[in-house]
Amino acid sequence: MLKFVVSKSEIEKKISIASSSIGSRTVDPILQCLLFKPVSGHINIHATDLQTSVVSQVRIGEYEGNEAFAVDAELIDDIVRNLSEDEVIFEYANGKLLVKSGKAKYNISTVSDVERFPIIDVDEGGVKFSVDTSILEEMLDRVSFCASSESAMRALNGVYWEVHGGFLRLVASDGYRLALAEQKLEIENEFDFIIGLKSVKELEKLLSSTTEPTINIIYDHSIISFNAGDVTMTVRTVEETFPDYKRVLPKAFKTRVVLNIDDFSEALKRVMIISKRGNEKVQLKITDDVMELSSQSPDFGEAVESIPITKDGEDLIVNFNPKFLNEAVKHIDEKELEFNFVDNISPLQVNPRNVEGYMYIVLPVRA
Amino acid sequence: MLKFVVSKSEIEKKISIASSSIGSRTVDPILQCLLFKPVSGHINIHATDLQTSVVSQVRIGEYEGNEAFAVDAELIDDIVRNLSEDEVIFEYANGKLLVKSGKAKYNISTVSDVERFPIIDVDEGGVKFSVDTSILEEMLDRVSFCASSESAMRALNGVYWEVHGGFLRLVASDGYRLALAEQKLEIENEFDFIIGLKSVKELEKLLSSTTEPTINIIYDHSIISFNAGDVTMTVRTVEETFPDYKRVLPKAFKTRVVLNIDDFSEALKRVMIISKRGNEKVQLKITDDVMELSSQSPDFGEAVESIPITKDGEDLIVNFNPKFLNEAVKHIDEKELEFNFVDNISPLQVNPRNVEGYMYIVLPVRA
């Protein structure tokens, strides 16, 4: 038996946070469930896809009984979200869960073998460090879009975390482009790990939904936990070696362009109307104070646009996949960008002007 | 040759209105195009799926040349929508269309055999009548959701228009339910026709986007035109006979219930959480001043909810497909509803309380 009374807004929020870690193609029905478990004065809601596990702690007044139960996550989410009164009574007994609120009454089935519910725990003795929530959120936003979701190289299907020399560095790459963000950290240990893309997306959701200013992280080799107040996410790392990304960072630039990010992304958006109907290619033609963007489609025609720039170094004509440029500028929240070119076959480095700690690398395509 | 200058907002709006009548599964490439045709001082944009045709008249200062051209609708819509300057220059010559605005320049392909573009015209000598835009919009909203989209009876795949005895009556049914809306009209002629569901949806878009207070309609047997200022939609009717709907309208009610529409739709929404995971059935149990709504699912459990009602006549237990009740209440914008029952196997009539001219009929399901 387990009985508790909770406010709709509290339980709705906590169910929603936990539910985000449930996989969409789950075979085992218990993995479609949320586990409600009373623990020393409160109720924990657990969810997992075996790779990531989320525990959200529900604030309640008091509870009777101490039996855990597991119930279909979508069903309980649907029920709670649609209630109209603020007070909700949960009453679990004999395998049935009664949910009552106002005149609404649900008598729903629960999973019988609740002790089978898998729980991933981190060793509290692992390395502890903290990052500002907003900083971690920005760093992940700037790199995670470059991660592959289906590379044969499993190491690329996630974000690489490198704690080294007093810095946290996040790197992601799909083999055609790479993004890198770094931040000073108060930590002496040195270690690195890869978190899979699905776990990264859940972590991003957690970061955007929490009001906690700091994320407390525990590293214990193959398991990492992220705590934000009453929500804890625990992740199994991807046990692979990340490629040596430092080798692809370009050096000795021959052309440096400074441009306004809005000018560039507006112009790019317009030439992409043709390129997406054609060969998925945009040509950048860089002369003294103008960058001309153009694209062709054999069936639909062509587009040309130009924007003002400031240039140091040589003139250059170079082609890119416009999607890779577009995604890059979408994730930079600055006014001015630097484009650093070596030549028309070497990787281009894009970074916000006068901002340290972030760079984006992208390979040109053949004309 | 054809050249004109137009404001972005004007051309964007007119392209968008015309584009709505383009079919999604068109085989003939010319049907994916918009035809731009100069006509006595302005440019008309035509689009058609052979069933419905839309002509929107573009307001421009002046134009040079008088050649028509046809261009891919999605492409030109995409181009115009993404321009950032207000002035747009269209310049058609030698099969190529040049679109220029600010520093953006597109040189795009057009269709060669432009005279093949199909135009549906109504005979201006047909029967003319007018309906207030807002009234016609409400009438269509109240009935069109009942039309079938895939019935073997082609007459049901649309909305039936009956002009009779000084009234316009719209009726739609999918065989399980029926909606009827009527309105007094200043007209002596009597005639009826069916408009297919896709054309009805385009007409609904036209009604919601126009600022014209009145729709001018011309009926010419197999062709109907709807004019709203600078946009005209012309439709081929469905040449079938609509079933005699008057036979299914229930009479001699034994139970009449008055209820608050928000109470009912909130309660229904909550029991549907179970019914949609079960047998798609909701039971209404009507006693003196309470209606109890309940549903069961063998896998997930059950839901019960009750709402206050005012009842005349006999107690009743009756089952419905909850989706059919839910869709009905969503299309009624009134505070109180009347449910008029004969018994638990005859059609239920739902209508707004104290509002004339609208009713919804739905068949119960077996317990």
Image (cartoon, coloured by chain):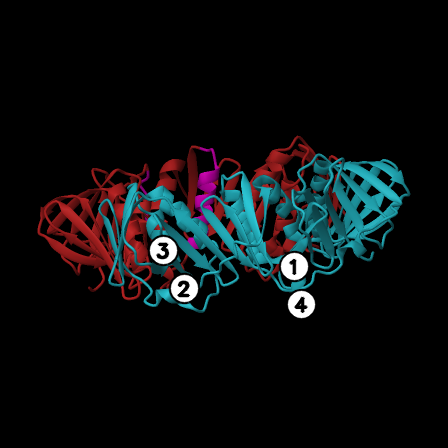
Chain colours: A cyan, B red
Q: Tell me: B225 left or right of A301.
A: left
Residue B360 circle label: none
**Inter-mark Cα distance, 4 to 2:** 31 Å
Chain ID of residue with mark 2 = A
Which one is in front in this view, the residue at disc 1 or the one at disc 2? 2
- Residue carrying label 3: A36
Image point (38%, 62%), residue name: B154
Please state the horizontal and vertical placement of residue B277, each as a whole percent of the image. 33, 61
Q: Please identify the residue farthest to the left as the structure is shown.
A: B314
Name the secondary structure under disc 2: loop
Q: Amino acid at mark 3?
A: Phe
Which one is in front in this view, the residue at disc 3 or the one at disc 4? 3
Residue A117 circle label: 2
Q: Please identify the residue farthest to the front as the structure is shown.
A: A125
Tags 4 and 2 in contact by the CB under 8 Å rule?
no
- Residue carrying label 1: A148
Chain ID of residue with mark 1 = A
Please state the horizontal and vertical placement of residue A35, each as a whole percent of the image. 38, 58
Q: Which residues are magenta?
A: B187-212
Q: Amino acid at mark 4?
A: Ala
Q: Amino acid at mark 1?
A: Ser
